[in-house]
Amino acid sequence: MFALPVTDTLVLALDDSGEEDWVFHFIEFDPSAHHSYRTPHGGQVLAMTVNPESHAAWIVAAGRLYASSREMEVAVPLPLPVEGMVPFDVTLIGDRYYVCGAASNIWYYDVPREEWVPLVVPAPRPEMPPRQGGESAESYTRRTSPQMYDYARRFPDMYRAFPVGQETYFCGALGRVIRLRDGATDEQWLETGARLVHGYDEGGAAVLCGDDPVAGIYRGTMEGGFEQLFQHDDPALHLTALHGGTRYIGAGLDPDHDGPCLFTLEHDALVPVETGCEREPGHLTHLKVTGSVLWATDLQGIFRLRDGRWRLTEITDLA
């Protein structure tokens, strides 16, 4: 199940655990209501973005791009910007759907113009030389690997797009951070070389979340640089949110992580959160603040903190 908080009172949960169908749940709070529908299964969901006004969703699943909406109640495949592109994220910012993918591909779909526009495109992959007569597979790999390794380091995968004020940031592998500002891009590479898999705006600064080689959370801007807020040897502990002046740390979908999955950070120490709900959060898919609400979603349900009280909505209760 992939649940995405959209507003203070709306979550879209896409249940992809079945074998035949996706099940969409538009879940509303204050007052409580939900609207559900089924569509043919499109694979395991990796990323999703939702228009809060139209309730239209774009989804990345199993290497493909889909669109669905609360009104249409169907999911349809969409063409990717270029054939063979491997997408990792789709994010709606303004009237653009940004898609980040392998080998530093960043494109956006311009809704008014109804066309894909390249923002960052890698150089063509180097052509592999033919295998020489009598050359072993091991020798051929040893001879060609440096060329491919160099290409992968120059054009690392990009994993997330997110707005910071009037700017748009993109983060990816090897600590690469790209900013789009007034139609032009600039970039930095964090010295840690962290794989930055998530980011968001926090008070006009970019928060960057890395999960390799260790968990690392950074905050800053392109002009001022990025300060490391948190580091932990457990790579799962790479999710964060600031709510009511308290820094929360969450464990993502890492099978090697065992134990509590939601903490507060108090004087550099992790303190497990006790929600008081029927159960505590498992491995998280999202840890996010929308206005006055903190959301923590896992593979089974949605935890919502408002006015000091946690509330749990289990997806099985919506069936």
Image (cartoon, rainbow, N blue to C red):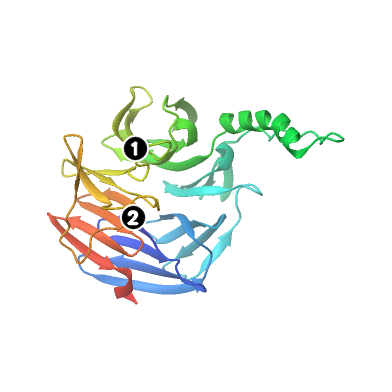
Residue at image x 35%, y 72%?
A: 35
| Amino acid residing under circle 1 | Asp
Which quarter of the picture shows residue 283? bottom left
| Amino acid residing under circle 2 | His
Q: In the rendered image, which residue does mark 2 sit on?
A: 283
**Does 306 sit left or right of 299 as displayed?**
left
Which quarter of the picture shows residue 69? bottom left
- Label 2 or label 1, whichever lies nearer to me, is 1
Which of disc 1 and disc 2 is earlier in sequence? 1
Of residues 36 and 239, the one nearer the viewer is 239
Query: Helix, strand or loop at disc 2?
Result: loop
Q: Is residue 41 visible?
A: yes
x and y percentages locating residue 186 in the rendered image: 47, 26
Q: Disc count in the image? A: 2
x and y percentages locating residue 196 in the rendered image: 42, 38
Q: Is residue 98 above or below residue 46?
A: above
**Does 72 sit left or right of 236 as displayed?**
right
Q: Can residue 176 be seen in this view?
A: no
Q: In the rendered image, which residue does mark 1 sit on?
A: 233
Residue at image x 75%, y 33%?
A: 139
